[in-house]
Amino acid sequence: MKLELKDTPGQLLGALKPISDIGGNIITIIHQRDQTTAENTLTVDIVLELPEKKLDALIDALRERGCGVIRVGKERLLQKQSLIMIGHLMHTDLTDTVDRIDQTGFAEVSELHMVMPAIDEPSTAKITIRAISPEDMLHAVRILREVAAQKDILILEPLGGAE
C-alpha cells in the first residue's frame, strides 16, 4: 500500500493506527522524509497482511484521517524459500520441473539462477519458490523433491527449511 501523508508530526502514527485497529499485521514500513512534494506531502510504503474483506474499511478509515491512498497492491504468494538443485538439469527438462510447481495454483517458481560448467557436467541452480501459505510451501517443496528423485537431481535445503 502506498500512502500520501502530510509532512507534519504524528501523520505516520495516524496512518498506522487504523491498520492496527482493523486487525492488520504490518510487515514493513518505508518512510523517506527527504522526498517531500511541493504540497509538503510525502509517500509511505506499507507492506501488511490483512484479510481482503477488511480492505475497503481500512481504505475508508485512512481517508477519514486525511491519508491519501495512492496504490493498493495484492500479493498472494507471501512465503518464499530458496533451494539448490545439482544434476543434469537441462537434460532432464528443466521446464517440466518448474511447470510441476507452477501448475499447482498455490505455488510458483519466482527465480531460477543456473550455472552450467560444461555440456556433459552437472549443472547447479538456485531455485526460489513462492507459495500462499507455509503448508503450501511444504507441499511445493515435496513436489520438488519427488521430481528430483525421478530425475536424479540432488536438492540442498537450508537448515531449518521446509520439513
Image: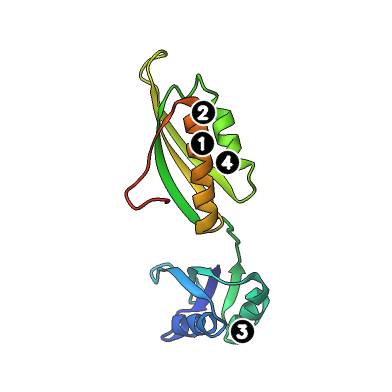
User: Would you call the spot at circle 2 few (<14 residues within 10 Å), some (14-19), or many (20 or more)?
Assistant: few
Query: Picture coordinates of residue 68 (x, y %)?
Result: 59, 76
Circle 1 residues within 10 Å: few <14, some 14–19, many ≥20? some
Residue at the disc numbered 3: 61
Q: Give the residue type that dot 4 points to.
A: Ile
- First in sequence, mark 2 or 3: give its number: 3
Q: Is residue 66 above or below residue 76?
A: below
Mark identifier at residue 103: none
From mark 3 to mark 1, how far is it between C-alphas? 48 Å
Q: Where in the figure is residue 38, as x and y percent of width and height? A: 50, 72
Q: Earlier in the sequence, mark 4 or mark 3?
A: 3
What residue sits 54% from the left and 85% below the top?
21
Q: CA distance from mark 2 to mark 3?
A: 53 Å
The amino acid type of the residue labelled 1 equals Glu
- SS type, badge 2: helix
Which residue is denoted by mark 2 in the rendering? Answer: 150
> What's the colour scheme?
rainbow
Q: Residue 39: tell me if it is visible.
A: no
